[in-house]
Amino acid sequence: MPQREIEVILSRQLASYLTMPIFIVDDQGTMIFYNEPAEQILGQRFEETGEMPPDEWVAASTATDDGGNALPTDALPLMVALRERRGVHGSMWIRGRDNQRRKIAITAFPIIGQAGRDLGAMAIFWEAHP
């Protein structure tokens, strides 16, 4: 695992202590961490997956809209927050690695470090009731 900026390290530390599902990507969109509450929704422990590039983690969760249409990677709230440096909220369906289909609501925002450095993005999400 590469050395991370202190803001990212602290974001990961904070996520590990919270009970809301949290997912963190670096400045390239590589998934670098998700916490234990997120594991229950995603259907697999982080220790089993490790870090993953965007195409792999997107494929692993099979994100779709309400009509069942696959969402492109660049349309996911987390990737929009990363690319546009702004907060984004939305909802989608995912199929976790446990093969369970769940509707989630998600709020994503960029992680911007001191001196305006783009460090990644974080998403807080939860199961939404259809």
Image (cartoon, rainbow, N blue to C red):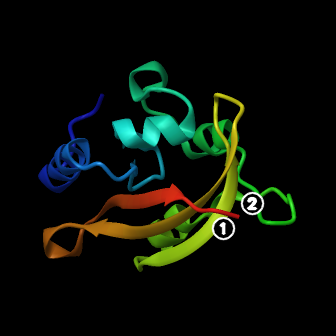
Asked if disc 2 and disc 1 are in contact, CB closer than 8 Å, the reply is yes
- Distance from disc 2 to disc 1, alpha carbons, whole Å, reads 6 Å
Q: Quadrant of residue 67?
A: bottom right
What kind of element bears circle 2? loop
Q: Position of residue 54 (x, y in %)?
A: 57, 46
**Picture residue at 71% right of the left edge, 64% below the top:** 130
Residue 106 higher or lower than 116, as above or below:
above
Q: Position of residue 25 (x, y in %)?
A: 41, 50
Q: Quadrant of residue 58?
A: top right
- Kind of residue at disc 1: Ala
How would you rate the neighbour count of disc 1 (Cα within 10 Å): few for under 14, some for 14-19, many for 20 or more? few
Q: Position of residue 19 (x, y in %)?
A: 29, 48
Q: Nearer the viewer, residue 28 or 125?
A: 125
What kind of element bears circle 1? helix
Residue 83 higher or lower than 104, as above or below:
below
Name the residue carrying label 1.
Answer: 75
Q: Quadrant of the N terminus?
A: top left
Q: Nearer the viewer, residue 31 or 64?
A: 64
Name the residue carrying label 2.
Answer: 71
Image-based side of 44 in relation to 24, left or right: right
Q: Position of residue 64 (x, y in %)?
A: 76, 57
Image-based side of 52 in relation to 46, left or right: right
**Picture residue at 62% right of the left edge, 68% below the top:** 91
